[in-house]
Amino acid sequence: TVVEQLTRKYETLSPVLDERQRRWWMGGEARALGRGGISAVARATGASRTTVTAAVREVSTRGAAERAGVRRAGAGRPPATVSDPG
């Protein structure tokens, strides 16, 4: 089935992809599948439908590839120098 094929692809690729690349892969696969793609990718990868939907939107957004860094601005923990200046 499609979900089994996606699972095999994801298991092969995920160890060498960072967080952003995994999102782009999920978004690209879901978009290529068309109707039902978001659900299929979510089942295959274990990601939430919300995450896959955001990934499709990110892939579809012009200039997404130009962004630097793995996470969006402001995401993740603050630097230790901010949370504990001492």
Image (cartoon, grey):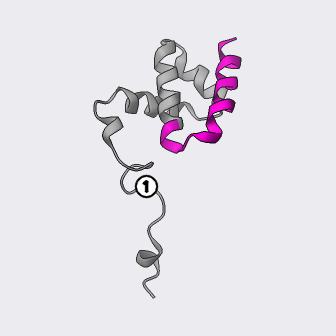
Magenta segment main secondary structure = helix
Q: Residue at x 70, y 24 (%)?
A: 8
Label 1, secondary structure: give it: loop
- Lateral position of residue 11 relative to residue 85, left or right: right
Expressed as whole percent of the image width and height from the top left, the position of residue 9 reads 65, 25
Instruction: Provide the residue designation for mark 1.
Output: 75
Q: Residue at x 65, y 40 (%)?
A: 15
Q: Residue at x 47, y 24 (%)?
A: 28
The quadrant of the image that shows the C terminus is bottom left
Amino acid on which the number 1 mark rests in the picture? Ala
Expressed as whole percent of the image width and height from the top left, the position of residue 27 reads 47, 27
Seen in the picture, residue 8 relative to 13 is either above or below; the reply is above
Seen in the picture, residue 70 relative to 31 is either above or below; the reply is below
Give the residue furthest to the front: 16
Q: Viewer-proximal residue, 64 or 36?
A: 64
- Lateral position of residue 73 relative to residue 14, left or right: left
Q: Is residue 37 magenta?
A: no
Q: Is residue 10 magenta?
A: yes
Q: Which residues are magenta?
A: 1-21
- Lateral position of residue 7 relative to residue 84, left or right: right
Q: Quadrant of residue 12?
A: top right
Circle count: 1
Q: Quadrant of residue 56?
A: top left
Q: Viewer-proximal residue, 76 or 21?
A: 21
- Lateral position of residue 25 relative to residue 40, left or right: left
Expressed as whole percent of the image width and height from the top left, the position of residue 57 reads 39, 29
